[in-house]
Image (cartoon, rainbow, N blue to C red):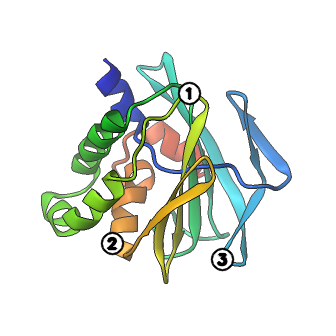
Amino acid sequence: MLRCLVLVALAMPGAVPAGAPAAEIAGVTVPDQVEVAGQALPLRGVGLLRWHHLVRVHTAALWLPPGAQPLDDVVKRLDLHYLRAFSAADFRAVTEESLRQTSDAATIAALRPLIDRYQALYIDRPADSSYTLTYRPAQGCEMAADGRPLRVIPGREFAHALFAIWLGPTPIDAGLRSQLLGE
């Protein structure tokens, strides 16, 4: 059951940046905008991922430039705030399963070295912690834990596959995707 719970949770990324509060969900407050690479990004949406509609797994918040689509090659940030504790092994298993659900085998094979570098960043996380994914087109995707940058994984294709887990055409949870996109 924990593996399934984590599968739905699949997280990456981190701390909620400073700014005026725009939304609160499950006791987590998120700002109305964040600054990334000198660009102010407005909050697009927030959501709550539940496992089997009962167990609250994580909140999510997405900041995206106005008019941008979620998988465009633009600066963006996705914050996942975990309401339950998860082990690094759980995160790795969920990431692998989610990538298999949202990307084709050829894409995963081509990205394997980058996926492995990313997977190595996971650590055991207590409840009330976060992972944040921040994508900068010229640099890559940065993973942060509770606001502490861990590493930047280069490449647009890697970032696209990672963000597609939550925001792609076949995300792990269509309802969460709709919430994040304000639909």
Residue that carries the numbered disc 1 in the rendered image? 127
Image location (x, y in percent) of residue 180: 58, 48
Which residue, as the protein is rendered here, is positioned at the far bottom? 138
Query: What whole-number distance in Å separates the C-alpha atoms at marks 1 and 2?
Result: 31 Å
| Horizontal relation, residue 182 to residue 107: left or right | right
What number is the disc on residue 87?
none
**Nearest to viewer (mark 1 / mark 2):** 1
Image location (x, y in percent) of residue 2: 34, 21
Decide which of 95, 25 is in the foreground and name it.
95
For residue 18, above or below residue 127? below
**Nearest to viewer (mark 1 / mark 3):** 1
Decide which of 182, 115 is in the foreground and name it.
115
Decide which of 159, 144 is in the foreground and name it.
144
Crowding at mark 1 (Cα within 10 Å: few <14, some 14-19, many 20+) = few
> Can you tell which quarter of the image residue 105 is in?
bottom left
Q: Are marks 1 and 3 in contact (CB under 8 Å)?
A: no
What residue is rendered at 27% in x and 38% in y?
A: 93
What number is the disc on residue 157?
2
Query: What whole-number distance in Å separates the C-alpha atoms at marks 1 and 3?
Result: 29 Å
Q: Are marks 1 and 2 in contact (CB under 8 Å)?
A: no
What residue is rendered at 20% in x and 60% in y?
A: 108
Residue that carries the numbered disc 3 in the rendered image? 37
What residue is rendered at 61% in x and 31% in y?
A: 128
Crowding at mark 2 (Cα within 10 Å: few <14, some 14-19, many 20+) = some
